[in-house]
Image: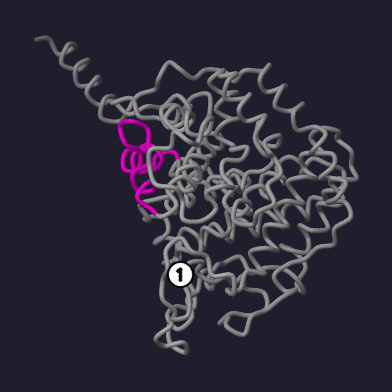
């Protein structure tokens, strides 16, 4: 056997181990993308008109006596933790999948509101290039990231606390997925006349500081290593913030983590997510994790490294994930696992993986299903688990 033959065999083996690009994904379908934009146009302009009237509300607008942080520190409490009936004054106990409505949620609600406002204004700006939308968005961005009186600290020491147990946890990092559309909105609007160089630099500096915290603090590292949707969401938001700040090292790290950790350890050969389907809300968590993985592909794909096309040697990739879940979105009665213990009737909505997958893989049927689903959910749990609500700012 010649050296050349040996070299070729070794190269093929290395490619098989590392994974391989599939032939199914090419350039996005422009026609389907236009259809998606037109589907959203009226809704976007209506939401932007609402957003124009909203004053900034940051974490400093509300506090909790149970927070161990300052007025500038984001605080939230674990959703599924309740007072112990046997010891009401003692540490909380877990009831998985059942949200405690008495837990402090004002900061999370404020961040979701912030995301909705900036996402709507950025979408309207992308459609119209009307400077009024950029000016309005900047008021909120300054309040959250620049104004010393109202800004949020670029860290998450006190998220998803548990009364009597923890003042904060790494699992709380998932709360800031709501900042993804804020970061993307800045990318869309940073060239507007309203955005001064100091504003843009200050906002990017905040995200750069938060990225440092996410990648060096133990909470951030714990979340990165989480084996389920939490690990997916760490990569998703780090990718979004790294793209805004131009951090190529972190972008490369996230691409490799998707290929070598998330995809091989979370997706089953059939495209399902076993770590999600075993939960008490298997349907909602499966939708959520597939949305997050699709967003990773959307944010991180480049012409030279298209994650939409990337497949493991056995064919696992984002298309297989969408193809697996799509029939249960089109007809939920076919769902083969137990119904979610809460919010079963509120899913699905207009999931991002449908519209982004439709445009990328040229699947008109997926787009049609997305078009008929709810684009403006009002249930708080659904909104919280749908961080991408403005596809227009991601489609380009």
> Position of 350 compared to 273: left or right?
right
Task: Name the spot of residue 88 as percent of width and height, x first.
Answer: 46, 87
- Residue at the left extreme of this rendering: 1
Q: Is residue 256 left or right of residue 157?
A: left
Comparing 331 with 132, the one in front is 331
Q: Is residue 63 visible?
A: yes
Q: Residue 368: where, in percent of width, then height?
A: 63, 24
Q: Is residue 297 left or right of residue 63?
A: left
**Residue 262 falls within the magenta-colored stretch:** yes
Identify the main secondary structure in magenta: helix
Query: Horizontal and vertical percent for residue 168?
Result: 49, 73
Give, as a single range, the part of the protein colored magenta: 255-279
Q: How is the image coloured?
A: one colour
* Number of marks in picture: 1
Q: Is residue 298 above or below residue 339?
A: above
| Place of residue 229 in the rendered image (x, y in percent of width and height, measured from the top left) | 44, 50
Is residue 396 something one can see in this rendering?
no
Closest to the observer: 93 or 384?
A: 93
Q: Which residue is mark 1?
A: 169
Q: Nearer the viewer, residue 346 or 37?
A: 346
Residue appearing at x 45%, y 52% in the figure:
281
Q: For the C terminus, give its image quadrant.
A: top right
Question: Residue, x 74% and y 28% (percent of image)?
Answer: 37
**SS at mark 1?**
loop
Q: Which image quarter is the N terminus in? A: top left
């Amino acid at each position: 056997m010649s050296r050349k033959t040996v070299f070729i065999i070794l190269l093929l083996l290395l490619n098989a181990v590392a994974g391989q690009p599939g032939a199914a994904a090419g350039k996005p379908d422009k026609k389907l993308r236009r259809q998606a934009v037109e589907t959203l146009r009226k809704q976007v302009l209506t939401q932007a008109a609402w957003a124009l009237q909203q004053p900034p509300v940051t974490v400093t607008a509300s506090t909790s006596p149970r927070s161990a942080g300052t007025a500038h520190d984001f605080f939230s409490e674990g959703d599924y933790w309740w007072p112990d009936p046997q010891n009401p004054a003692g540490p909380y106990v877990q009831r998985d999948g059942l949200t405690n409505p008495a837990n402090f949620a004002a900061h999370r609600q404020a961040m979701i509101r912030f995301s909705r406002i900036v996402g709507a204004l950025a979408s309207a700006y992308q459609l119209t290039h009307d400077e009024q939308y950029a000016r309005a968005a900047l008021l909120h961005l300054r309040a959250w990231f620049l104004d010393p009186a109202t800004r949020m600290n670029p860290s998450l020491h006190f998220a998803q606390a548990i009364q009597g147990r923890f003042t904060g946890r790494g699992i709380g990092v998932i709360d800031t997925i709501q900042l993804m559309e804020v970061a993307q909105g800045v990318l869309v609007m940073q060239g507007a006349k309203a955005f001064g160089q100091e504003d843009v630099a200050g906002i990017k500096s905040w995200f750069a500081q938060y990225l440092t915290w996410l990648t060096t603090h133990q909470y951030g590292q714990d979340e990165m290593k989480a084996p389920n949707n939490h690990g997916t969401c760490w990569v998703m938001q780090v990718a979004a913030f790294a793209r805004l700040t131009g951090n190529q090292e972190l972008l490369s790290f996230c691409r490799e983590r998707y290929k070598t950790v998330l995809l091989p350890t979370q997706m089953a050969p059939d495209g399902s997510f076993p770590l999600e389907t075993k939960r008490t809300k298997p349907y909602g968590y499966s939708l959520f994790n597939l949305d997050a993985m699709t967003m990773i592909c959307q944010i991180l794909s480049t012409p030279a490294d298209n994650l939409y096309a990337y497949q493991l040697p056995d064919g696992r990739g984002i298309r297989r994930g969408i193809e697996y879940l799509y029939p249960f979105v089109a007809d939920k009665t076919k769902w083969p696992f137990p119904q979610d213990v809460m919010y079963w009737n509120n899913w699905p909505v207009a999931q991002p993986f449908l519209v982004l997958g439709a445009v990328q893989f040229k699947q008109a049927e997926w787009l049609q299903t997305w078009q008929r689903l709810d684009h403006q959910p009002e249930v708080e749990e659904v909104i919280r688990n749908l961080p991408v609500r403005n596809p227009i700012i991601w489609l380009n």
